Each structure stands twice: as structure tokens, then as C-alpha cells.
Image (spheres, grey):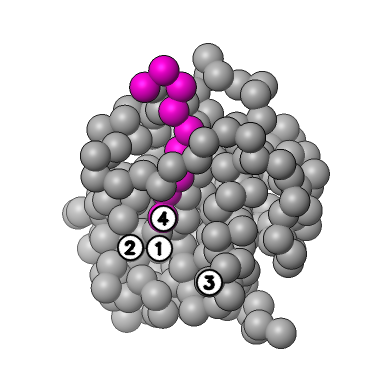
């Protein structure tokens, strides 16, 4: 049985374990480098003010994931968003009928165009290098993607579950999540994901594929 306690602070442990090379370490706070994701985390929310002030020089808008951070006195209060952390423990058996390809640098511009259309705030220039990304093309157009983002030694986050608005309703997301999750299991790791608690459509989709809610998790948006 893998120790799930790291998932209580997934950004911190991703930046401590598999993604330490992408970390800006301010001591009490660790952030991903700005080109990768806008996320950071702490183990002591009372000691975040200095790191937030320093990181604000690199990125206009970013997030502390976890407990409410202590802000610099000159900053506005952070805005809270609440997500569900969901996890699946067994391979998914949903049928895959589409051709799914592993995306590489040749697909980069297509990937960026699709994420900018649907997912502009969280997907940065190098987010795709944090893990493996998969896609479905129709008539030479990238219409759906799913990939891997945060990674610890035993867990990998499924992220960027995106379908072009003109291609919804074909089961592409279910097939891509199935493919991505099962590839994670093949590495002897466990897939998890995060979704806004108000986003009921995707939550129901994930439940149908076998994901269960592990916990709620807070995202604190900081703008300077």
C-alpha cells in the first residue's frame, strides 16, 4: 500500500520528489518555475509572506495550494477556490475506439492552441514537459488532450483534460483519461486529479470511470 499522505500537500511533495528540478525553493515555500505551472505550496502557512513577495516579481498571478497563506501586508487578500482531489485505484476498463497518440514537440503548437482556447490560466509554455501528454486528432486537427502534471514518487496527477468545444459528446475525454490512467498504472504508480468542486459535469465523468473523492483541497489565488 502506497502512503497517500503526500497527496495532502501534492505540490510540495511533487517539488520535493520527482519535480525538484523545476522548483524555486524559498525555504518555507516551494513554487514551480513560472514556465511550468503557477502553483506553489508550503508546510507552514504562517511563513509565506516573504516568498509570496519574491515570487510576485516573476509571475503576476499564481496560487498557493493548501492552507490559507499569510500575505505580505501590501497585498490584497487571496481568493479561495475549492477543488476535489479524486483518485482511482484500479485500471479503467472503458473501451478505447479512437486512435490516441503520444504528443511530442511536433505537436506543440497544436497543443498550445487548444489549451489557450480552453485552459489558458494554468497551462504554461513548459507544462507539457512535466509528464506525458496524449491526444486525438480529427482531420489533422488536435481536438482532445489529456496529460500528466504533478508527480511524486508514487502518484501522478492527470491534468489538462481538454476537448475542443466543437468536438464534445464523442467520449474523447473518457478514452483519453482511461489511456492516461492505465499508462500511469503501468509505471506502478497511482493516478489522481483535481477538479473544481462546482464543476459537476467532469466530476460525474470521473466517478463513472472509477475515481473517488479523496479530499477537498484549497487553491489560494494571489494577484499583484
What is the CA distance from the residue labelled 1 to the residue labelled 4? Answer: 21 Å
Left or right? Give the position of 62 relative to 154.
left
Look at the image and give the residue range highlighted in magenta.
Answer: 132-140
Q: Residues within 10 Å of mark 1 (few under 14, many from 20)?
A: many
Front residue of 220/134: it is 134
- Residue tagged by mark 3? 187
What is the CA distance from the residue labelled 3 to the residue labelled 2? Answer: 24 Å
Residue at image position (34%, 35%) is 111
Residue at image position (44%, 71%) is 14
- Residue tagged by mark 1? 40
Looking at the rendered structure, the secondary structure element under dot 3 is loop
Magenta segment includes 9: no
Picture layout, residue 9 above or below residue 58? below
Where residue 51 sits: x, y (%)? 30, 68
Residue at image position (28%, 67%) is 22
Q: The N terminus appears in which quarter of the rendering?
A: bottom right
Looking at the rendered structure, the secondary structure element under dot 2 is strand
What is the CA distance from the residue labelled 4 to the residue labelled 2? Answer: 18 Å
- Name the outermost residue toward the top: 166
Between label 3 and label 2, give the one nearer the viewer: 3
Looking at the rendered structure, the secondary structure element under dot 4 is loop
Q: Using the rendered view, name the quadrant where residue 198 is placed.
A: top right
The disc at residue 32 is: 2
Q: Is residue 82 visible?
A: no
Asked whether the beta carbons under mark 1 and mark 2 sit within 8 Å of each other, the answer is: yes
Asked whether the beta carbons under mark 4 and mark 2 sit within 8 Å of each other, the answer is: no
Left or right? Give the position of 64 relative to 190.
left
Mark 1 or mark 2, which has the lower sequence index? 2
Where residue 167 sits: x, y (%)? 55, 19
Residue at image position (66%, 30%) is 171
Amino acid at each position: 500500500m502506497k502512503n497517500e499522505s503526500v497527496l495532502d500537500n501534492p505540490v510540495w511533495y511533487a517539488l520535493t520528489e520527482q519535480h525538484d528540478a523545476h522548483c524555486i525553493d524559498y525555504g518555507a515555500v516551494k513554487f514551480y518555475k513560472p514556465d511550468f505551472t503557477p502553483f506553489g505550496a508550503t508546510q507552514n502557512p504562517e511563513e509565506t509572506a516573504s516568498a509570496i513577495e519574491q515570487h510576485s516579481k516573476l509571475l503576476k498571478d499564481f496560487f498557493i495550494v493548501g492552507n490559507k497563506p499569510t500575505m505580505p501586508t501590501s497585498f490584497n487578500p487571496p481568493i479561495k477556490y475549492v477543488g476535489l482531489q479524486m483518485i482511482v485505484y484500479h485500471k479503467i476498463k472503458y473501451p478505447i475506439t479512437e486512435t490516441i497518440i503520444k504528443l511530442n514537440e511536433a505537436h506543440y503548437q497544436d497543443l498550445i492552441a487548444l489549451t489557450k482556447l480552453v485552459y489558458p490560466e494554468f497551462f504554461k509554455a513548459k507544462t507539457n514537459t512535466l509528464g506525458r501528454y496524449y491526444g486525438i486528432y480529427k482531420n489533422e486537427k488536435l481536438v482532445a488532450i489529456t496529460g500528466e502534471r504533478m508527480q511524486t514518487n508514487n502518484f501522478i496527477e492527470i491534468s489538462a483534460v481538454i476537448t475542443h468545444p466543437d468536438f464534445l459528446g464523442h467520449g474523447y475525454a473518457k478514452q483519453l483519461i482511461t489511456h492516461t490512467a492505465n499508462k500511469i498504472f503501468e509505471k506502478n504508480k497511482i493516478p489522481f486529479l483535481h477538479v473544481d468542486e462546482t464543476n459537476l459535469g467532469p466530476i460525474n465523468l470521473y466517478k463513472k470511470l472509477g475515481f473517488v473523492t479523496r479530499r477537498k483541497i484549497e487553491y489560494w489565488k494571489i494577484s499583484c
